[in-house]
Amino acid sequence: MTQLQTETGIVRVPAGTWKVDRDHSSVAFEVKHLMIATVRGHFSEFDGALEAAEDDPSNSRAWGTVYVASIDTGNPDRDAHLRSPDFFDSERYPEMRFETTRIRHTEGGHYTVWCDLTLKDQTREVEVDACVEGVAEDPWGNERVGISIRGAIDRTEFGLTWQQALASGGLLVGEEVRVLIDVSAVRA
């Protein structure tokens, strides 16, 4: 895999428009259960794109949509509860959306990215770390870029407030949700 690096040491996405390839990307999360174990899940339906600026990576922008009914934690009963009004209320709020508001290069291929995240009609600015993993041509002649995104949100700030207190103290479901997104995008 080849990374593009400028004379300033910045590893960046080549200029142009890139479309997320859902078959080679993932939108996943982790949350604590009983405050001692980690439950992992993902969303199987999502779309996104990136417009990489020609001049300065901070002038780039990205946006995307996640269809919350596509949640999968490996447990059908839990997934149904997560789709219910107790959590995502996927019938009333079928989409989670994000759009970048600022991008700052930190070093090499690493960036701090701020974006507006909208979930259940609540929009909050969140901060994530993004890393340009590299650029390559696939066997079919498509130029691809790989980007990993890591961050955390407080689910209660987005109206996902269902909770159950434990008799021993603590909570059934953690309030912090770790976000793990791995993108393979194709030049549009």
Image (cartoon, grey):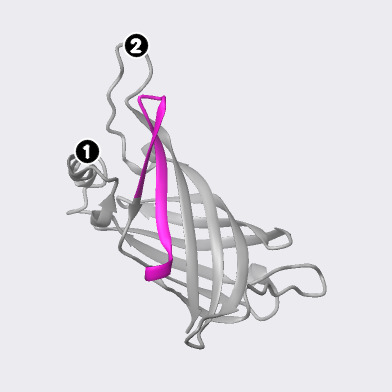
Inspect the magenta stretch and tell me whether residue 9 lies in it: no
Q: Nearer the viewer, residue 169 or 155?
A: 169
From which residue to which does the magenta span run? 23-41
Q: Residue at x 51, y 57 (%)?
A: 115
The residue positioned farthest toward the top in the image shown:
168
Which residue is pictured at 41% across the width and 47% down the height? 29
Which residue does the numbered mark 2 point to in the structure image?
168
- Tell me where residue 94 appears, x and y as whole percent: 24, 58
Q: Looking at the picture, does residue 48 appear above or below residue 38? A: below
Q: Is residue 142 above or below residue 176?
A: below
Question: Quick one: 149 or 2, which is closer to the camera?
Answer: 2
Figure quadrant of residue 168: top left
Give, as a three-letter code, the residue at label 2. Answer: Ser
The answer to whether 25 is drawn above or below residue 38 in the figure is below
Left of 85 or right of it: where is 18? right
Any magenta on residue 28?
A: yes
The amino acid marked with disc number 1 is Asp
Q: Residue at x 43, y 54 (%)?
A: 117
Residue position marked by numbered label 1 in the rendering: 86
Whichever of labels 1 and 2 marks the residue nearer the N terminus, that label is: 1
Residue with the most extreme right position: 7
